C-alpha cells in the first residue's frame, strides 16, 4: 500500500495511537498508518469534520462499528479500537502489509486463472464470516482487497451496513464504486449478502482482465450498465467465466451463496493448479479439428487408418508372408506403409484350430486362388441337390 507524508492539517496523535503516514483518503475520511505503545501497527480512519457534525451519521457510524466488532476470523482486518464520541469519530483496524489487488494488477498485469480462483475462494470464505455477523460490506472492490503474505484481506468496512438495510445514505457519503455496485444498490432497495457476491464477481473479473465487466465511463453511465446491460467477460478464462457470470446476475436470488462460491472456486483453483481443464475450450477444439489428417497429409492418414481400421490387415488380398521364409525372417511391409511382425510357425496351433473361420487351407497351408469360384461351386452344389430331391419326391408320387 502506498504511503504519503503527513500533511500540516493532519493530526499526529489520535487516541493512544501515534500517526506516521497517510495511507489514503475516501468519501468518509482519511486513513493513516499508526502504532500503539507496544509497536502494533494499525490502519486508523478519521471521519471527515462535516460528517462528524451530522448526528444521524454518527448514529449510523456507531451501528456499523458495532457490527464490525462482531466479525470473527475470515479474510478481514480485525477491528482494534474505536472512539465514537470523539470530536471526529475514528476507528482502527489491524494493518495489513501488501499491495491492493488493484495496484498489483495495474503494475504486474492480470492474474492467472489459478491465482484468481485461489484469491476468490479465500475472499468468499471471508465473506461467509462477515455475513454470519449480520454485516454486508457494500463496497467490495479491487482497491479494498489487500494481498498480504498470509493471504488476501478485505478492508474498509466504512460503509458496511447491517443485513437488510437500505443503500440510501446521507448526501456526501459514499454508497459504493460504480462498476462494482450491485443493481439493487443502484435501485436503492435492501442489500443482502448477495450484494457482496455481485461485487466479488466483478472484482474477480477485474483480476482476470484488468478491466471492469461494465467498462468505463461516468457514474451515470456505469450505473445504467449495471442495471440494464449484461457484463462483458471477454478475456475471462473459460474455467471461471460461467461462475462469474452467475455472480453478476441481475436478480440476487440467482446468484450463488458465498459458501457455494467458496467451494466452487476451491475446486477450480485445484484443477487449474494441476493443469486439468474442466472443459475443452472452443479454440482448442478448433485446433484439434485442424490437426486431423487430410488428403494433404498422406502419411498421417495412413497412420490413422492403421489405428482405426485394423481389419484391413486381415483381408485376403494381403501378401502371403508364410511362404519362402523362416520363423526369424523380416516381416514384409503392408499396403499402408507399416509392417506386421511374423509369428513363429511353431507358435501357432496345428490343425483346424490354427485356421481362421471361413477360410479353407490346403495341406501346404495355401489359400484358394479364387474365393469367388469357391462360392459359385457351393451355390451350384445346393441347386443340384435341390433338383435331385424334387425329382425323387415326384417319382415316389407316381
Image (cartoon, grey):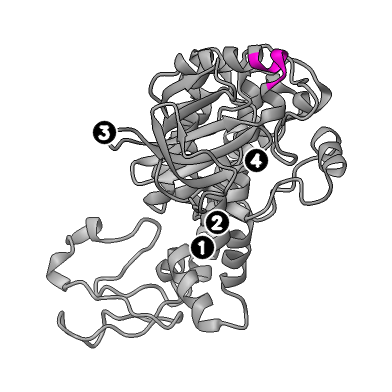
Q: Secondary structure at mark 4?
A: helix
Q: Which residue is mark 3?
A: 38
- Residue 26 falls in which quadrant of the image? top right
- Mark 4, Cα crowd under 10 Å, few <14 / some 14-19 / many 20+, is many
Q: Residue 88, relative to residue 288: is it above or below?
A: above
Q: Mark 3 or mark 1, which has the lower sequence index?
A: 3
The disc placed on residue 105 is 2
How far is the residue under mark 3 from the one under mark 1? 35 Å
Left/right placement of residue 346 relative to residue 343 reads left
- Report which residue position mark 4 lands on: 202
Q: In this rendering, would 105 be left or right of 249?
A: left
Quarter of the image that includes the C terminus: top right
Query: How far is the residue under mark 2 from the one under mark 3?
Result: 34 Å
Q: Look at the image and give the residue range highlighted in magenta.
A: 53-58
The first of marks 2 and 4 along the sequence is 2
Q: Closer to the N terminus: mark 2 or mark 3? A: 3
Near mark 1 (Cα within 10 A), the count class, few <14, some 14-19 or many ≥20, is: few
The mark closer to the camera, 2 or 4, is 2
Question: Residue 219: image x %, image y %?
Answer: 82, 42
- Point out residue 301 in the picture as x, y percentages from the top left corner: 53, 76
Residue 46 in the image: x percent, y percent?
56, 31
Foreground mark, 4 or 1, reads 1
Q: CA distance from mark 3 to mark 4?
A: 39 Å
The residue wearing badge 1 is 108
Q: Is residue 277 visible?
A: no
User: In the image, is residue 56 part of the stretch drawn in magenta?
Assistant: yes
Between 348 and 49, the residue placed more toward the observer is 49
Contact (Cβ within 8 Å) of mark 1 with mark 2:
yes
Amino acid at each position: 500500500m502506498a504511503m504519503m507524508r503527513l500533511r500540516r492539517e493532519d493530526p499526529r496523535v489520535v487516541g493512544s495511537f501515534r500517526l506516521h503516514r497517510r495511507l489514503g483518503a475516501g468519501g468518509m475520511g482519511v486513513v493513516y498508518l499508526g502504532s500503539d505503545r507496544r509497536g502494533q501497527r494499525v490502519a486508523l480512519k478519521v471521519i471527515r469534520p462535516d460528517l462528524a457534525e451530522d448526528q444521524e451519521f454518527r448514529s449510523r457510524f456507531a451501528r456499523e462499528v458495532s457490527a464490525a466488532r462482531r466479525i470473527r476470523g475470515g479474510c478481514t482486518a480485525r477491528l482494534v479500537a474505536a472512539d465514537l464520541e470523539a470530536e471526529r469519530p475514528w476507528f482502527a483496524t489491524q494493518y495489513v502489509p501488501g499491495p491492493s489487488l488493484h495496484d498489483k494488477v495495474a503494475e504486474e498485469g492480470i492474474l492467472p486463472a489459478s491465482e484468481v480462483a485461489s484469491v476468490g475462494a479465500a475472499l468468499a470464505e471471508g465473506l461467509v464470516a462477515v455475513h454470519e455477523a449480520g454485516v454486508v460490506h457494500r463496497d467490495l472492490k479491487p482497491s479494498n482487497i489487500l494481498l498480504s503474505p498470509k493471504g488476501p484481506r478485505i478492508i474498509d468496512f466504512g460503509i458496511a451496513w447491517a443485513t437488510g438495510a437500505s443503500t440510501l445514505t446521507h448526501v456526501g457519503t459514499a454508497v459504493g464504486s460504480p462498476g462494482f455496485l450491485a443493481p439493487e444498490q443502484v435501485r436503492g432497495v435492501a442489500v443482502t449478502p448477495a450484494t457482496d457476491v455481485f461485487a466479488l464477481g466483478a472484482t474477480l473479473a477485474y483480476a482476470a482482465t484488468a478491466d471492469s465487466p461494465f467498462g468505463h465511463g461516468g457514474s451515470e453511465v456505469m450505473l445504467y450498465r449495471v442495471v440494464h446491460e449484461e457484463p462483458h467477460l471477454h478475456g475471462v478464462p473459460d474455467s471461471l467465466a460461467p461462475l462469474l457470470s452467475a455472480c453478476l446476475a441481475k436478480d440476487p436470488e440467482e446468484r450463488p451463496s458465498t459458501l457455494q462460491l467458496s467451494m466452487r472456486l476451491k475446486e477450480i483453483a485445484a484443477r487449474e493448479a494441476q493443469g486439468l481443464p474442466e472443459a475443452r475450450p472452443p479454440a482448442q477444439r478448433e485446433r484439434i479439428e485442424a490437426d486431423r489428417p487430410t488428403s494433404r497429409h498422406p502419411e498421417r492418414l495412413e497412420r490413422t487408418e492403421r489405428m482405426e481400421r485394423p481389419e484391413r490387415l486381415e483381408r485376403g488380398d494381403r501378401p502371403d508372408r508364410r511362404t519362402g521364409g523362416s520363423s526369424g525372417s523380416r516381416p514384409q511391409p503392408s499396403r499402408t506403409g507399416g509392417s506386421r511382425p511374423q509369428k513363429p510357425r511353431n507358435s501357432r496351433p496345428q490343425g483346424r484350430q490354427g485356421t481362421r473361420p471361413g477360410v479353407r487351407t490346403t495341406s501346404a497351408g495355401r489359400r484358394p486362388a479364387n474365393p469367388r469360384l469357391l462360392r459359385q461351386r457351393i451355390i451350384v452344389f445346393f441347386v443340384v441337390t435341390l433338383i435331385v430331391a424334387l425329382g425323387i419326391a415326384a417319382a415316389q408320387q407316381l
